[in-house]
Image: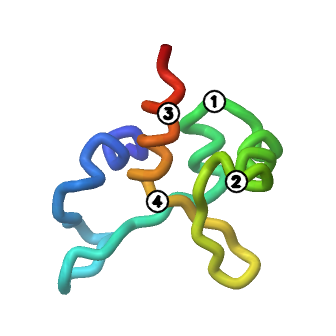
Amino acid sequence: MKAELIETANEPLTGSRRPSGPAMLQLMTLSEVAKLLAVSERSVKRLVGRRSLRCVRIGRSVRFDPSDVRRWVEARKE
């Protein structure tokens, strides 16, 4: 499901879990990004610490914009 979200991040969001008003961004959790990239949560934290992967901080929580994750992956393709 999250892979689909990343592929369609620029499309309007719909569905029961998403707001019904103006399209709002669905942010990913640290564990969702780790699963998507097939790495540990610690590895994702390191990327954030090095400012390699952008994140949004909400209090003590860290969230990720799917389009930022997609751009990060695209920039590392060989």
Q: Is residue 70 above or below residue 68?
A: above
Please give the name of the residue rendered at 36% of the width and 45% of the height, measured from the top-left corner.
6
Per the image, label 3 sits on a secondary structure element best described as helix
- Judging by the rendered image, the residue that carries numbered circle 4 is 65
Q: Distance from label 4 to label 2 (Cα)?
A: 14 Å
Q: Distance from label 1 to label 3 (Cα)?
A: 12 Å
Foreground mark, 4 or 2, reads 2
Asked whether 35 or 73 is in front, the reply is 73
Q: Distance from label 4 to label 1 (Cα)?
A: 17 Å
**Label 4 CA crowd tier, 10 Å (few <14, some 14–19, many 20+):** some
- Where in the figure is residue 19, as x and y percent of width and height? 28, 80
Whichever of callouts 4 and 2 sits on the residue coming sooner in the sequence is 2
Q: Identity of the amino acid at label 1? A: Ala
Q: Identity of the amino acid at label 3? A: Val
- Judging by the rendered image, the residue that carries numbered circle 1 is 38
Q: Which numbered marker is on residue 73?
A: 3
- Judging by the rendered image, the residue that carries numbered circle 2 is 51
Left or right: 9 with respect to 42?
A: left
Per the image, label 2 sits on a secondary structure element best described as loop
Q: Quadrant of residue 1?
A: top left
Foreground mark, 4 or 1, reads 4
Foreground mark, 1 or 2, reads 2
Q: Identity of the amino acid at label 4? A: Asp
